[in-house]
C-alpha cells in the first residue's frame, strides 16, 4: 500500500526519476531545481540507476543532449528553472517539433530580471506555446505522481510530445511534506520499457531526423503537433485511470474543489491551490458557496471541460502567478475566458495577478479575492477586470 | 514512404517532424536552381586526376564505370565552386549562369 515518507518536492522528483531509471539525464544546476540533478547524480554514483548522467555546461546543451539521446532511441530526462529554461528555449521547440518524448521537471521560478530566484510561473508561461505537454502540481505528492505518469503519456504513439511537470520553486521544491511513494517494482512495471518505432541507432533502418522543412511542409507538421496535443487529452485520462488503479489517487485535467453548487470560484495552478482550499473551507463554514478549479493539465488546455465546470458560477477569478504584461490579464485568464466565450458560458470574470517573484500569497489575500467576487455578484458586472492581489500600488 | 511525400500530400500521410525513413534519398532533392554561377568542364585540360568529384558536396560530378569523370549534372550543382578551386589544371572554369 505504498511507502510513507516525508520529502521535499525536489527529493520527490529525484526519487521519481530514480524509479523511472531513464537511459540519459542531462542537466545543469539552477536554483531552485538544482537539487534534482544533484540527488540524481548521487543515485548514478551509487549505482542505484543505470542512467548515463551528462554533466553539461549549459541548459542549451542539456536540452540538446536530451534531444540527441531521445532521437537515438533513449529515454531522456532533465530538470531546470527560470533562466535555465530560457536558455533551453531554442531546443525546447526542437524537442517538440521532432516529436521527442523528453520529460522535464520544471521547478517554477521568476525569469530575471531584475534578478529574482523565487517562485512565479513566468518560466512556464514563456514556453506555453512551444508544443510541450504541461502538468502542474499542487504539492510534492502531485509532482511525484505526475512524473510517474509522464512517460506513459509522452511516449504514447498517438502523442509523441515532450512533457514538463511543474512544481512551485521553494514553496513545494524545498518544503518537506508527507508523501506516499510507490514501490520500485510497481513503478518499473507501470512506466514500462521505451520502445520507439523509429530511432537513429537502429542499424536496420537508417533515418534522417530534423531535415529542412520548407513552405510546402512546415504547416502540416505543425498541424500534426496540434493533433498530437489534442490526442494527449484522451491518453492523459487513460494513464490517470491506470494510475488510480495502482495507487488509489485520482487525477483529472483539473481538480474541482467544492464546485458542485459554487457561486464564486477561483481558478489557479500549483501550490496556491492549497491555500485556496483552506479559504474555501472557511467560507463554506460561513455559508458562502465558494469553489476552486485547480488546473493540472495546462497544455493541452481543457477548454470545453473548464467552461462546463465554470458555466454555473456567478463570478470567477482567474489567478495568474505571472503577468503577461499585455495590459489585458494573465495567460491562464486568457485561456479560461477564451474557453468560456467559445463555449458560450457568460460569467463575469476577473484576472488576478499574484505572487510575482515569490511574493507570499496568504489566506488573507485569497479571502480578499473571494470578497471582491461577492461584490461582482452583487453589482452584476465587472468594472475593473485586470486586478492584482498582494501588490503595493 | 517518406520519399513519395510531395507538396500535395495531406498532413495525415506525412511522417512526423519531417522524418525520412529511407537512406540515400538526396538524389530526390534537385538543388540546381539555387545556382548563380556555374562550373564549365573543359575536357581537353582534364587529366582525370580525380580530385574534383570527392569534394563536390552534392551529386553534380558523375563518374562512369571507366572511373572517369563526365560533364556536370546541373540538376544538383549549386555553383559553390569548390571543384574549380581544387582543380590543378584549370579544367573547371566558373562562369556566369546567364
Image (spheres, coloured by chain):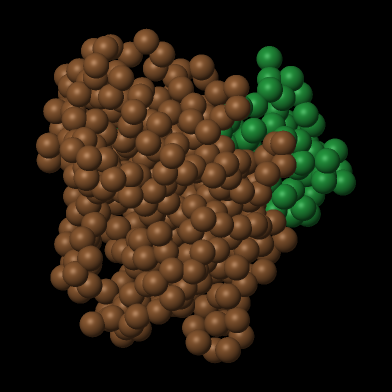
- Write down the colour of chain A: brown
* Quarter holding residue A80: bottom right
Of the 4 image quadrants, the one containing the N terminus of chain A is bottom left
A121, above or below A350, in the image: below
Where residue A250 appears, as percent x and y from the top left, is 21, 61
Where residue B91 appears, as percent x and y from the top left, is 80, 39
* Quarter holding residue A349: top left
* Quarter holding residue A225: top left
Where residue A54 appears, as percent x and y from the top left, is 63, 70
Of the 4 image quadrants, the one containing the C terminus of chain A is top right
Q: Toward the viewer: A150 or B61? A: A150
Q: Toward the viewer: A30 or A356? A: A356
Q: Residue at x 22, y 65 (%)?
A: A249
Count of numbered labels shown in the rendering? 0
Q: Toward the viewer: B18 or A262? A: A262
> The chain drawn green is chain what?
B
Tell me, yes or no, if residue A358 can be seen here. yes
Q: Residue furthest front?
A: A286
Q: Residue at x 83, y 41 (%)?
A: B85
A195, above or below A316, in the image: below
Amino acid at each position: 500500500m505504498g511507502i510513507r515518507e516525508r520529502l521535499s518536492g525536489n527529493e520527490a522528483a529525484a526519487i521519481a526519476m530514480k524509479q523511472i531509471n531513464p537511459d540519459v539525464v542531462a542537466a545543469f544546476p539552477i536554483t531552485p531545481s538544482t537539487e534534482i540533478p544533484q540527488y540524481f547524480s548521487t543515485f548514478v554514483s551509487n549505482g542505484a540507476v543505470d542512467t548515463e548522467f551528462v554533466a553539461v555546461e549549459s541548459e542549451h546543451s542539456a536540452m540538446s543532449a536530451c534531444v540527441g539521446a531521445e532521437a537515438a532511441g533513449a529515454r531522456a530526462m532533465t530538470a531546470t528553472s527560470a533562466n535555465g529554461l530560457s536558455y533551453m528555449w531554442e531546443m525546447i521547440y526542437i524537442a517538440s517539433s521532432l516529436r521527442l518524448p523528453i520529460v522535464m521537471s520544471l521547478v517554477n521560478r521568476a525569469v530575471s530580471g531584475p534578478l529574482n530566484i523565487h517562485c512565479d510561473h513566468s518560466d512556464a508561461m514563456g514556453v506555453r506555446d512551444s508544443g510541450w505537454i504541461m502538468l502542474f502540481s499542487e504539492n510534492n505528492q502531485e509532482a511525484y505522481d505526475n512524473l510517474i505518469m509522464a512517460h506513459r503519456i509522452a511516449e504514447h504513439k498517438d502523442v509523441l510530445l515532450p512533457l514538463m511537470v511543474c512544481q512551485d520553486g521553494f514553496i513545494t521544491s524545498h518544503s518537506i511534506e508527507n508523501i506516499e511513494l510507490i514501490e520500485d517494482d510497481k513503478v518499473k512495471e507501470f512506466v514500462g520499457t521505451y520502445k520507439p518505432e523509429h530511432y537513429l541507432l537502429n542499424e536496420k533502418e537508417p533515418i534522417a531526423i530534423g531535415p529542412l522543412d520548407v513552405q510546402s511542409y512546415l504547416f502540416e507538421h505543425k498541424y500534426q503537433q496540434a493533433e498530437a496535443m489534442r490526442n494527449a487529452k484522451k491518453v492523459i485520462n487513460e494513464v490517470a485511470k491506470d494510475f488510480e488503479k495502482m495507487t488509489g489517487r485520482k487525477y483529472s485535467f483539473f481538480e474541482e474543489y467544492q464546485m458542485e453548487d459554487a457561486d464564486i470560484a477561483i481558478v489557479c495552478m500549483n501550490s496556491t491551490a492549497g491555500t485556496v482550499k483552506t479559504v474555501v473551507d472557511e467560507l463554506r463554514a460561513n455559508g458562502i458557496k465558494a469553489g476552486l478549479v485547480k488546473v493540472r493539465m495546462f497544455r493541452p488546455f481543457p477548454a470545453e471541460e473548464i467552461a462546463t465546470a465554470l458555466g454555473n458560477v456567478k463570478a470567477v477569478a482567474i489567478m495568474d502567478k505571472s503577468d503577461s504584461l499585455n495590459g489585458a490579464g494573465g495567460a491562464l485568464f486568457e485561456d479560461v475566458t477564451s474557453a468560456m466565450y467559445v463555449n458560450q458560458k457568460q460569467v463575469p470574470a476577473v484576472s488576478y495577478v499574484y505572487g510575482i517573484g515569490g511574493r507570499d500569497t496568504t489566506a488573507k489575500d485569497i479571502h480578499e479575492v473571494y470578497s471582491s467576487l461577492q461584490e461582482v455578484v452583487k453589482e452584476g458586472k465587472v468594472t475593473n477586470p485586470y486586478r492584482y492581489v498582494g501588490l503595493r500600488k | 514512404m517518406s520519399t513519395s511525400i510531395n507538396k500535395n500530400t495531406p498532413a495525415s500521410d506525412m511522417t512526423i517532424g519531417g522524418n525520412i525513413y529511407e537512406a540515400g534519398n538526396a538524389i530526390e532533392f534537385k538543388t540546381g536552381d539555387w545556382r548563380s554561377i556555374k562550373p564549365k568542364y573543359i575536357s581537353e585540360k582534364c587529366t582525370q586526376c580525380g580530385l574534383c568529384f570527392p569534394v563536390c558536396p552534392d551529386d553534380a560530378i558523375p563518374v562512369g564505370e571507366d572511373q572517369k569523370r563526365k560533364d556536370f549534372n546541373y540538376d544538383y550543382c549549386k555553383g559553390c565552386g569548390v571543384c574549380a578551386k581544387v582543380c590543378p589544371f584549370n579544367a573547371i572554369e566558373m562562369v556566369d549562369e546567364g
